[in-house]
Amino acid sequence: MAQLWGGRFTKSTDQMVYDFNASISFDQKLFEQDLRGSRAHVKMLAAIGVISEAERDQILAGLDGIEADVKGGSLEITSEYEDIHSFVEANLIDRIGDAGKKLHTGRSRNDQVALDMRLYTRDQVDATSDVLLHLLETILGIMEEHIDTIMPGFTHLQKAQPITLAHHMGAYFEMLKRDVLRLKDIRTRMNYCPLGSGALAGTTYPLDRYMTADLLEFDGPTLNSMDGVSDRDYLIEFLSALSTIQMHLSRFSEEVIIWNSNEYRFVEIDDAYSTGSSIMPQKKNPDIAELVRGKTGRVYGALMSLLTTMKGIPLAYNKDMQEDKELAFDAMETVHDCIVLFDGMLATMTFNSGIMANSAKNGFTNATDAADYLVNRGVPFRDAHGIIGQVVLYCIDRGIAIDDMSLSELKEISPVFEEDIYDAISMETCVNKRLTVGAPGHDAMVEEINSCKEFLESCRS
Ligand code: ARG
C-alpha cells in the first residue's frame, strides 16, 4: 500500500477496504493523460514562480523517465498503489527526491482526475469520430455504385414501394452523419479545463488556469471550481451519443441479418466476416452483425449507470464518481470496435442486385404507381385504389406480377388501361419519377450523393 495520505491516521487501512477503494486496476488507462496534466501543471507552477525552473526541469525529466520505463516494460503499474495519480507521484519522488514532492502543489486528485478523464474522453470523442467518418466513406461508396440498383422499400417489414440500394444506404448515411455532428457539439461544449479547481474551492496559489488550459489545448478553464471537480455531464453526453450510434448500428445490423437470411438473400456476408456452426455444416452465420446488435445493451447500461451514479451526489467531489470509469471505458471500446467491424463487414459484403430487383417487382411495390397512372387519366384516386386492389387480387390468385398481365386482362378490370401502363409501372419508372428532395429517383440521388460528399469534405478540412 503506497498511499499519498496517512498523517492523521493511527491505524493502517484494512486490506479489503483498501482494495474496495482502489482504482488503479482500471484508472491506469489514464496514465498518459495523467502525465500530460502533470507536465502542464509544473510548467505553469514554474511560470508563476511557485517552483523554480530547475525544479520544473527535474520534475519533467522524472515524468519522462516514468513514461519511458512504463512503456518499455521495466516499470510496472501495480496494485501497490491506490490509483494512477499515486503511482506517478510516488514514483517521481522515488526517482528525483524532494523536487518530486512539489508536483502536487496547488492541485488535488479531485481536479487531477477530472482533468484526466476529460482528456481521455476528448481523445475518444475524436477516435470515434474518425472511425465513423471511415464508415461513412464506405456507405458513400456503396451509394455511388448502387445508384440504380432497385430493391423493395419496406414499411412494417412488408414490401411497400420500390427504392434503390443507394437510397436505403443514404438513410444510414444521414443517421451516422448526425452522430458525427453530435460528437462535434460535445467536443465543443466539453473543451474546458478543470485543472486548478483544487479539491473544490480553487487554491491560494496564483495559478494561471489560462496557461494550463492552453497547454492542454482547451478553449479555456472551467468557470466554477466546484463544478470543475464534480461535472461529468460531458461523459454522460458522450455515452448518450455512443448509445445513439450503437442504436443506429444495431438497426443496420438487424437489416443485414434479414437481408443475409436464406429467405431474402439480398446480400451475402463475406466469409471473413461470417462464422460456421459446430454441428450444421451448411451454416454461415452473421455473427458480427448479431454481436453489434447484442452489444447495444452494455452501451446503454453504461449510460444508465452513470446517470444513476450522478443523480444523488451533493457538491462537490464524492467517491461515487470513481464509478464513472469502468463502464464508460468499456462502452467507448465497444462502440469503437463495433464501428470498425461493421465497416469491414459492409465493405466486403456482396449485394445480389438481381434478387433485390425481382423482390421489388414481385411484391406489388408498383401498385401505388399503377393507381397514379389511372388518376392521371381522370379516374378519382379512391376509385383507382379500388381498381388496383382488384388487379392485385387477380395477380395473387395467379401468382404473377402486375407487369405480367396482358392488356386485355387489365382492360377487363378497367378500360382506362392502355399500352403505356407497362412503362408507367416498370420498376425503373417508379423509382426515377420520384424526384423530390431526398427521394430515390436517379437525379435526386445524384444531388443527395453530392451533399454526402460535401459533408465528408467539410469534415476533412
Ligand atoms: N480514484 C479517484 C477517482 O477516480 C481519484 C480522486 C480521488 N480523490 C479523493 N479525494 N479521494 O475519482
Image (cartoon, helix red, strand yellow):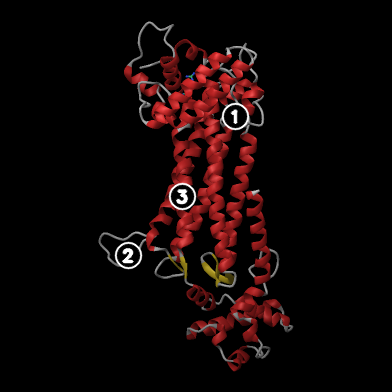
Q: Nearer the viewer, mark 2 or mark 1?
A: 1
Q: How crowded is mark 1: few (under 14 residues within 10 Å), some or many (20 or more)?
A: many
Residue 42 image position (x, y, % from top left)? 56, 19
The quarter in which the N terminus is drawn is top left
Q: Residue at x 48, y 30 (%)?
A: 32
Answer above or below: position of 19 versus 398: above
Would you identify the image quadrant in which residue 87 lies?
A: top left
Percent x, y for residue 2? Answer: 38, 16
Q: Which amino acid does label 2 sit on?
A: Lys
Figure check: 33 above or below 57: below
Residue corresponding to mark 2: 283
Name the mark on residue 338: 3
Q: Where is residue 302 in the image (x, y as percent from the top left)?
A: 47, 38
Q: Which residue, given by chain and number where applicable, does mark 1 sit on?
A: 216
Q: Residue 344 carries which label?
A: none
For mark 3, give the secondary structure: helix
